């Protein structure tokens, strides 16, 4: 079977995400919105968890117009109490959680000498501590339910190489990749699969709003990465994908 066929929308209920509950952090726009759309099109009930709640509500309304079961929930992943409330709300509303997609992330592009201590802590809290806390809370819910669950961490080529003026971002993405593999090893006995998506440059606001000089033609459609997330979630019970790299054809994840 060709790769395009593998990534194509499932044609049967047995190969779909029908009925599964998935929470996507940072789901209001960009890659998060694309993931919510693709998983929703495959039958998942998607929770768009984002600190920008109005944007998340607007996006959920757009998805609803496409007959996707989507709701918005406010979530600041740097706030552990907010993470707890979100997971408890999901448990109370749906009774289960089948997948967590840790997608929320920020960056501060600046030389080390110009980074403030507050900026360093902010990037660490959003990109690494937040996914760590959400994984802990969601794994506790998944471990107690039939069928286990799945944690997908959105890493980056920044977890494989390094460039100047992005030290905080690199530290978090290298850390997130390590966390993913550690949790992959630890949570398998509980029926919880963990995967890191090493994503290359995408045509999203995360890049284009900050670097307008970038050629969009050298980047990839975030829907392509979202389809790989779906592919990971559709693996049979006996198979797990711990890490997968998805790049524009003219990008490399290596120095």
Image (cartoon, rainbow, N blue to C red):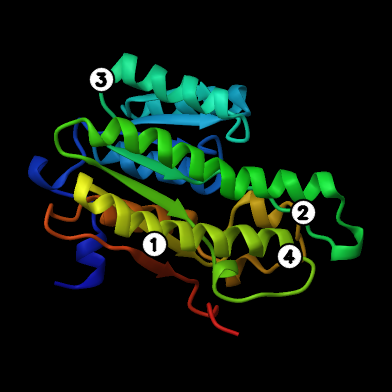
| Residue corresponding to mark 3 | 95
Q: CA distance from mark 2 to mark 1?
A: 26 Å
Lower sequence index among marks 3 and 2 = 3
| Mark 4 vs 3: CB contact within 8 A | no
The reply to whether residue 72 is in sight is no
Helix, strand or loop under label 4 = helix
Question: Which quadrant of the view contains residue 186?
Answer: bottom left
Tell me if label 3 and label 2 are in contact, CB under 8 Å: no
- Which callout, 4 or 1, points at the residue further toward the start of the chain? 4
**Residue, x 48% and y 63% (percent of image)?**
178
How many other residues sit within 10 Å of disc 4, few (<14), some (14-19) or many (≥20)?
Answer: some
Earlier in the chain: of badge 4 and badge 2, it is 2
Q: CA distance from mark 4 to mark 1?
A: 21 Å
Mark pair 4, 2: CA separation? 9 Å
Q: Which residue is mark 2?
A: 108
Q: Outermost residue, bottom direction?
A: 255
Residue 69 at x, y percent in the picture? 32, 25
Q: Nearer the viewer, mark 3 or mark 1?
A: 1
Q: Is residue 19 left or right of residue 61?
A: left
Q: Which residue is mark 4?
A: 167
Q: Residue furthest top?
A: 92
Q: Quadrant of the N terminus?
A: bottom left
- Circle 1: element type: helix
Residue 123 seen by the camera: yes
Q: Residue at x 66, y 49 (%)?
A: 124
| Label total for image | 4
Which quadrant of the figure contains the C terminus? bottom right
* Residue that badge 1 annotates: 181
Question: Gap in Å between the C-alphas at discs 3 and 1?
Answer: 28 Å
């Amino acid at each position: 079977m060709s790769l395009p066929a593998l990534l194509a929308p499932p044609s049967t209920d047995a190969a779909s995400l029908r009925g599964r509950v998935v929470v996507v952090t940072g789901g209001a726009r960009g890659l998060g919105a694309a993931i919510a759309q693709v998983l929703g099109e495959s039958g998942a009930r998607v929770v768009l968890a984002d600190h920008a709640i109005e944007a998340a509500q607007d996006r959920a309304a757009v998805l609803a117009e496409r007959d996707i079961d989507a709701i918005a929930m406010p979530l600041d992943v740097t706030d552990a109490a907010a993470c707890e409330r979100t997971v408890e709300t999901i448990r109370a509303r749906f009774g289960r959680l089948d997948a967590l997609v840790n997608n929320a992330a920020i960056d501060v592009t600046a030389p080390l000498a110009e980074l403030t201590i507050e900026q360093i802590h902010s990037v660490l809290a959003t990109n690494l501590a937040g996914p760590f806390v959400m994984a802990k809370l969601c794994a506790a819910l998944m471990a107690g339910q039939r069928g286990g669950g799945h944690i997908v961490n959105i890493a980056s080529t920044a977890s494989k190489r390094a460039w100047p003026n992005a030290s905080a971002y690199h530290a978090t993405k290298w850390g997130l990749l390590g966390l993913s593999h550690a949790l992959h090893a630890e949570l398998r006995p509980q029926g919880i699969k963990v995967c890191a998506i090493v994503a290359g440059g995408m045509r999203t606001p995360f890049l284009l709003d900050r670097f307008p000089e970038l050629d969009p033609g050298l980047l990839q459609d975030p829907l392509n990465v979202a389809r790989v997330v779906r592919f990971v979630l559709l693996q049979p019970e006996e198979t797990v994908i711990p890490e997968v790299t998805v790049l524009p054809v003219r990008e490399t994840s290596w120095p």
